Image (cartoon, rainbow, N blue to C red):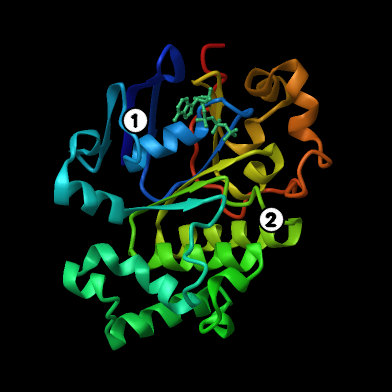
Amino acid sequence: MLEVSQVTRRFGTNVAVDNVTIGIPEGQMVGVIGASGAGKSTLLRMINRLIDTTEGKIVFSGTNVSALRGQKLRNWQRDCAMIFQQFNLVPRLDVLTNVMLGRLNHRSSVASLLNIFSDQERAMAIAALERLGIERAAMQRAGTLSGGQQQRVAIARALMQQPKVILADEPIASLDPRNAQIVMQSLRDINRNDGITVVTNLHTLDTARTFCERIIGMQAGKVVFDGGPDDLTEAAARSIYGADGLEDAFSEAVTSTSLAPARPARAKETKEPALVGA
Ligand SMILES: Nc1ncnc2c1ncn2[C@@H]1O[C@H](COP(=O)(O)OP(=O)(O)OP(=O)(O)O)[C@@H](O)[C@H]1O
């Protein structure tokens, strides 16, 4: 269980995340939606400890991860892999090496420094690439791949960490619809087959509804919706995006990554629909 309890993050006087409390059971696939500036990235970055909370705490399986330091913090960042909109690969290195870099937190600093990888790590990396359907690009420089391929490499690298949680910060925001679909489906398959908890920030409602079993809506730093895809009614969307943002949130024209609404692949037990504070 990942428990975010009364978490607030301020930047100066700006409250980016405002007293958020959510509990995410192991193995859930969660989409976090909201308008630009709603606090989605800040929330994910606090969970991974790229930034610290101002108030509140984040607990994973009984460990207060918001208080970790040193090796224990690095262990948490290994268990909690992060995927970014801009992939964060090393463009001049080949794909296989990029994927193996996901093992860095598992190994000694000397081996890491020299980029020495074992046969086992190589085999593991190839298996991860095969899983994502991009093994043929293994020896290509990462910078020469398309955006969709690069994001799949980033997911393979995350898998090398053998994480318990994957946090994806707008993973499809730079991709065309077809690649967006492949990337979201890959995350969904990993969630379903490996039981890895996935929490992903998404710009569009329809993507969240298609791939996520639970959707958390944020507005001005607060959680204003928490429910299943079918609960995301127009009224709920209005509470997340506001009346003015509603059209954009539903519009396929706004982003190239909009995907047709569909039922989620797996409907697990979700909480009662909740217009939080309604
Ligand atoms: N490092 C920072 N320094 C100052 N303010 C920040 C910083 N990071 C985020 N903010 C502010 O915090 C608020 C929330 O930003 P955040 O990036 O979390 O929103 P978001 O919902 O992820 O938006 P987007 O969809 O545009 O990425 C915004 O007002 C933003 O300007």
Q: Are the residues tagged 1 and 2 within 8 Å (C-beta)? A: no
- The residue under label 2 is 175
Q: Amino acid at mark 1?
A: Val
- Residue 107 shown left or right of residue 176 in the figure: left
Q: Amino acid at mark 2?
A: Leu
Name the secondary structure under disc 2. Answer: loop
Labelled disc at residue 277: none
How far across and down, in percent of the image, does residue 7 sit?
A: 34, 23
> Residue visible at 63% across and 30% down?
231
Which quadrant is home to the N terminus? Answer: top left
Q: Nearer the viewer, mark 1 or mark 2?
A: 2
The verdict on label 1 being within 8 Å of ligand 1 is no
Mark 1 to mark 2: distance in Å?
30 Å
> Residue visible at 53% across and 63% down?
189
- Residue 89 shown left or right of residue 249 in the figure: left
Can residue 108 be spotted in the picture? Answer: no
The verdict on label 2 being within 8 Å of ligand 1 is no
**Precedes in sequence: disc 1 or disc 2:** 1
Can residue 178 be spotted in the picture? Answer: yes
Mark 2, Cα crowd under 10 Å, few <14 / some 14-19 / many 20+, is many
In the foreground, 41 or 14: 14
Mark 1, Cα crowd under 10 Å, few <14 / some 14-19 / many 20+, is many
- Residue 33 shown left or right of residue 20 in the figure: right
> Residue visible at 65% across and 38% down?
203
How far across and down, in percent of the image, does residue 87 sit?
A: 53, 57
> Residue visible at 50% across and 72% down?
92
- The residue under label 1 is 4
